[in-house]
Amino acid sequence: MGRVEIHRANLSGRDLAVGDIRGHFSRLEAALADAGFDPVVDRLFSVGDLVDRGPESEQVLAWLAQPWFHAVRGNHDDYAIRFARGNPVDAVNYRQNGGGWFLALPEARQQEIGAALEMLPIALEVETAQGPVGLVHADCPLPDWRTLCHRLENPESRRAAGELEDECIWSRRRIAEQDLAPVTGVRAVVVGHTPLRQAVALGNVYHIDTAGWLPEGRFTLLDLATLEPVGGDTVLMITPEPGRA
């Protein structure tokens, strides 16, 4: 399993990114239909959290088998991976956070799903005509995208790799601190993890989890060529004031 996955530019159709899915694949299908998504030429990139809390989490294997669907690993995906591995997992906490469906599965099915999720990269990069766009689940913990990718692929130690992966899939530092510093070495970074009423860009980091997995939420589909949502939604752009760092 490579920790970083690179995708060449799509010369035939659109590349769309979507926020956390959380086991609501039918809702996602409806959003894709409204957006005119064509799986023959278009591609869909997920910022992770494919499972938990929704009734269709087990469909994740069918989605991961689609050649047009690509995803990074989210913290909820990581729960399933660690449980299937036999790593220490607080089962009560896991159940409270939507993992009951996984705990109820036969062990062989747990192993099958866990192995598929473990193949997901931590970071993903998509080429566009305007420059590369990066995806991680929660945050880019380093100021430079190229450095992040290098350290993920060439960790100094297993502990260092684990700590960096955890920051990529768990951290909310940037949005909590309203950090507007751009991530260098990449056109933009797209993340999920933190549910919002509206997609927000802090500098060049786009937070697109608009809670399509909640009754009152919706799936934001971000066109990676334009960095604009499909279907009339907008991104709230937050940039430094002139003259201020």
Image (tube, rainbow, N blue to C red):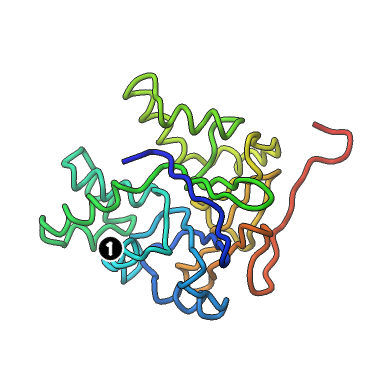
Residue 32 in the image, given as x and y percentages of width and height: 51, 74
Residue 174 in the image, given as x and y percentages of width and height: 60, 39
**Residue at the image position 74 percent from the left and 53 percent from the top:** 237
| 139 vs 219: above or below | above
Dot 1 corresponds to which residue?
61
Q: In which quarter of the image is the C terminus?
A: top right
Residue 33 in the image, given as x and y percentages of width and height: 51, 80
User: Which residue is nearer to you in this view: 90 or 105?
Assistant: 105
- Looking at the image, which residue sits at the far top? 156
User: Which residue is nearer to you in this view: 207 or 128?
Assistant: 128
Q: Callout 1: helix, strand or loop?
A: helix
Q: Residues within 10 Å of mark 1 (few under 14, many from 20)?
A: some
Q: Quadrant of the N terminus?
A: top left
Taking 73 as reference, is 105 left or right?
Answer: left
| 7 vs 24: above or below | above
**Residue at the image position 35 percent from the left and 65 percent from the top:** 66
**Residue at the image position 49 percent from the left and 51 percent from the top:** 193
| 24 vs 156: above or below | below
- Looking at the image, which residue sits at the far front? 11
User: Which residue is nearer to you in this view: 188 or 125?
Assistant: 125
Taking 18 as reference, is 103 left or right?
Answer: left
Q: Quadrant of residue 90?
A: top left
User: Which residue is nearer to you in this view: 51 or 115?
Assistant: 115
Residue 114 in the image, given as x and y percentages of width and height: 23, 51
**Mark 1: amino acid:** Leu
